[in-house]
Amino acid sequence: MAVRLDADTVSSLVGPDLARIGREHLDQGRVFELAREDGGVAAVVLDSAREEFDVWVGVVNGALTGECDCEDDETAPLCGHAVAVTLAALEDGLSFTSVPESDDDDDEDRFAEVAATLSFDQLVDLVARQAVADPDFADELLSLADPND
Ligand SMILES: [Zn+2]
């Protein structure tokens, strides 16, 4: 699933200050080695202090997400470096693919199809064995059986 983004969307997501910082990095040619990676885009950003940051930007569970070596991304979803990489990717026409989200959906659909082919006894047996192996699954099973418990 490709996620459509443009510069206006990015700036409304991150706010005008970060959008300006990202644009500045880009305009001053500080984004290098832009490449597709893991459904998103990776690059190296050299900031004004000539410090290098490895940055990855992609869409995780439907949300634009940046990963960067700097500390700023602990307070904001994206730091200025990640914004710069996002803008650079947009200018290069690279699209972001929401990999984790679509994979989960595909897997669930696939498992549901397979489960639908099993007999009732097979399903009961499978659920019982999984409940023994996985305490979280067992809790979920028990709460479904008795929602008031
Ligand atoms: Zn950063």
Image: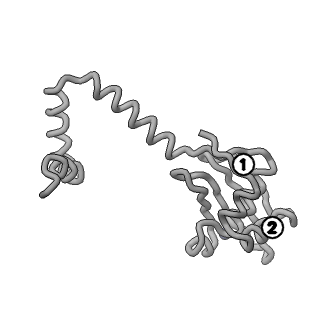
Label 2 sits on what residue type? His
Mark 2–mark 1 Cα distance, whole angstroms, equals 17 Å
State the image quarter where residue 81 is shown: bottom right
Which coloring applies here? one colour
Q: Answer with the quadrant where ligand 1 appears in the image.
A: bottom right
Element type at marker 1?
Answer: strand
- Pinpoint residue 10: horizontal percent, then vertical percent: 70, 59
Q: Position of residue 21 (x, y in %)?
A: 77, 71
Which residue is most to the right? 28
In the displayed structure, 91 sits above or below 117; it is below
Label number found at residue 35: 1
Q: Is residue 58 above or below residue 21?
A: above
User: Given the current orientation, which residue lies at the most extreme front position?
Assistant: 148
* Mark toward the viewer: 2 or 1: 2
Give residue 25's mark: 2
Q: Position of residue 72 (x, y in %)?
A: 62, 74
Q: Residue at coordinates 64% horizontally, 47% vertically from top-left?
A: 37
Amino acid, disc 1? Ala
Judge from the rendering whether residue 47 lies leftward or rightward of residue 37; answer left or right.
Answer: right
Of 135 and 8, nearer the camera is: 8
Which residue is nearer to you in this view: 143 or 27?
143
The reply to whether callout 2 and callout 1 are in contact (CB within 8 Å) is no
Name the element at disc 2: helix
Q: Earlier in the sequence, mark 2 or mark 1?
A: 2
